[in-house]
Image (cartoon, rainbow, N blue to C red):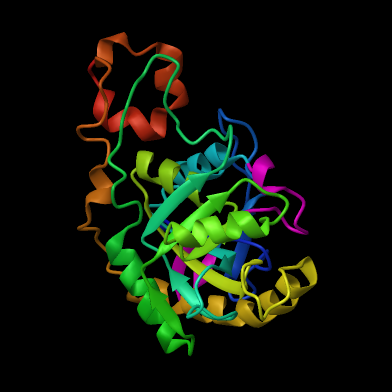
Amino acid sequence: MEQARIGVIGGSGLYRMPELASSTPVKVDTPFGSPSDDFRKGLLKGVPVVFLARHGEGHRILPSEINFRANIYGFKALGVERLLSVSAVGSLREEIAPLDVVVPDQFIDRTRNRISTFFGDGVVAHVSFADPVCGEMSRTMAESARRAGAKVHEGGTYLCMEGPAFSTRSESHLYRSWGASVIGMTNLQEAKLAREAEICYATLAMATDYDCWHEDEEPVTVETVVARLSQNARTALLTLAGAVERLPRERTCPCANALRNAILTEPARIPEETRRKLGPILERYVRGRA
């Protein structure tokens, strides 16, 4: 099978991809520990794709427990250059109704004590994150979702909260006052780590509820989320299938060179152990510069 350059991260309700033909499990050992589950490599519409269930099959892993570094490192080690993420979210805007799809272009981080960088241990890098998602991939995702019959909101801010409890009413109203569009618990770390790994990243945010700010709606519950996830799953799968067909083979976006001017540490001063640990990420910038 041809090298898979596209990866898919399935969120709540999307733990497997039946449409992934010739699917085989791939176990990846990383210097950061174990990924959420085995990766699944197969063909989606004839295109090689690698799939990973963010919470593990059977939804075993809390948002705060996800080993984001191992997940993104695993995709990088497998040769993935583009990551399509699917997530369940709550809507913070009247116009974003449950079952609508949002393709956000910004993030606000409200998590606590989550590791969201590969760097440290003797190497310092600061990537640009002003535009945290790949514009090219986001446009493709939005168009594919429209073709799948979804009502799509292109652009907007994803607020990433710690969880696992849902928001208080005061928090929900606060986030609305900040201009946030949707709220979830997972995507911010993925986006940051993907940028450091020079992997394009885009999110398909599937609205399941109005969080708890909407006076005419019941506060979000697991029962509500699960019921709407099953309705959203088909839209997500159709969107992903359409997106992988439409993505151009070659990347022309800046994501592919995010580390070019980001590493501050002199190559000769990077510890050998750190060089080995970050091999797939650092190799092109430190090769032959010991």
Q: Position of residue 184 (x, y in %)?
A: 58, 58
Which residue is drawn at the image coordinates 52% and 80% (left, top)? 100
Note whether 85 is above or below 161 in the view shown: below
Q: Determine if the magenta segment contains residue 54.
A: yes
Q: Is residue 241 left or right of residue 170?
A: left
Whether residue 215 is visible here, answered yes or no, is yes
Q: Position of residue 66 (x, y in %)?
A: 64, 43
Which residue is drawn at the image coordinates 33% and 76% (left, top)? 246
Which residue is drawn at the image coordinates 60% and 53% (left, top)? 185
Report the span colored magenta. Answer: 42-66
Which residue is drawn at the image coordinates 39% and 72% (left, top)? 141
Question: Quadrant of the image for the C terminus?
Answer: top left
Q: Determine if the magenta segment contains residue 89.
A: no
Note whether 256 is above or below 290 in the view shown: below
Q: Quadrant of residue 27?
A: top right
Whether residue 45 is visible here, answered yes or no, is no
Q: Is residue 125 left or right of residue 52?
A: left
Q: Quadrant of residue 54?
A: bottom right
The residue closer to the viewer here, 33 or 130, is: 130
